[in-house]
Structure formats: C-alpha cells, structure tokens
Image (cartoon, rainbow, N blue to C red):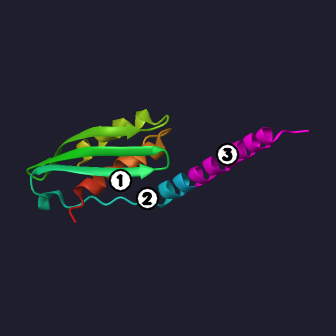
Amino acid sequence: MRTVLQVAGMLLVLSALLGCQQMERNMDEFVENAEYTTPDLQEIPDGTYTGKQRVGIVNVKLRVTITDGRIEAIDLLKHFNGQGEDAEAIIDDVIAAQSVEVDTISGATYSSTAILKAIENALTLE
C-alpha cells in the first residue's frame, strides 16, 4: 500500500513533467511565430538602449549602443540559457548585418530568438 507521501511525490513529479511539456510547447510556439523587424537605425538617437526578452527558461537582458545610425556594440547583461550559450554568437551577426533579421544559431534556437527579440525591443523606442 502506498503512503500518502509516495502518492503526493508521484503527483508532484507528474505535475512537473506536464508543466515542462507545456513550457516547451510555449517556447516552440514563440519561436515559430517570431518575426523580426529592424527599426530604421538612422532615426535612433545616439545612445545606449536596454532590451529584455524571456522565452520559457531563457531570459535575456542586453544593452545596445547606437552611434551615428549604426549598432556599435551589444553587451549581454544576462543570459539564462539552459544549453543555449552558443546563441551568443548571434550578436556578432547582428552587428555585421546591422539588422536583427539574421539566421538563428542551430542548436540554440530558443536563446537565439530571445536575443534577437531583446535587441529589437531595445531599439523600439516607444
């Protein structure tokens, strides 16, 4: 006969598994529906802008520096990424392209998407 603690433990594990599956579905949906738009950099005043994005377990905060209508630097302030550390290379791609409309990093899609959206959020001056 199972004890109350064993049953409660099994219910807790089952609940955690279902929660993880839902979070992964939400992350997949976010990535599938992600669209990127690069604002007109010439219209953004020189300065430093902060952007954030959270996608499931991935949490990004960064700072984008604009000088003379160009992305000069992107400093990653926080990147809780699970296994998505490789996505940090996308920053160089964005600076080279002067656009958030670049390909995500294979194997680090969630983190890549979160970084791109955080950059876009930083540059959207509303």
Percent of width and height locating residue 99 = 27, 52
Per the image, the residue denoted by label 2 is 34
Residue at the outermost bottom position: 126
Residue 10 placement, left or right of 96: right
Residue depicted at x 28% and y 44%: 62
Which amino acid, by three-letter code, is at mark 2? Ala
Which amino acid, by three-letter code, is at mark 1? Lys
Per the image, the residue denoted by label 3 is 17
Q: How far apart are marks 1 and 2 (CA)?
A: 8 Å
3 or 2: tag closer to the N-terminus = 3
Which amino acid, by three-letter code, is at mark 3? Leu
Residue at the outermost front position: 4
Give the structural element (helix, strand or loop) at label 3.
Answer: helix
Q: In this view, does 4 lie above or below 124?
A: above
3 or 1: tag closer to the N-terminus = 3
Per the image, the residue denoted by label 1 is 117
Residue 118 among those drawn in magenta: no
Q: How far apart are marks 3 and 1 (CA)?
A: 28 Å
- Number of residues whose C-alpha sits closer than 10 Å to that of mark 3, classed few (under 14), some (14–19) or many (20 or more): few
Percent of width and height locating residue 44 = 14, 58
Q: Is residue 102 visible?
A: no
Residue 30 placement, left or right of 87: right
Give the structural element (helix, strand or loop) at label 2.
Answer: loop
Question: Between 15 and 61, which is closer to the camera in this rendering?
Answer: 15
Q: Are marks 3 and 2 in contact (CB under 8 Å)?
A: no
Q: Do the residues labelled 1 and 2 touch (CB within 8 Å)?
A: yes
Which quarter of the figure is the C terminus placed in? Answer: bottom left
Residue depicted at x 49% and y 36%: 82
**In this picture, which residue range is highlighted in magenta?**
1-25
Give the structural element (helix, strand or loop) at label 1.
Answer: helix
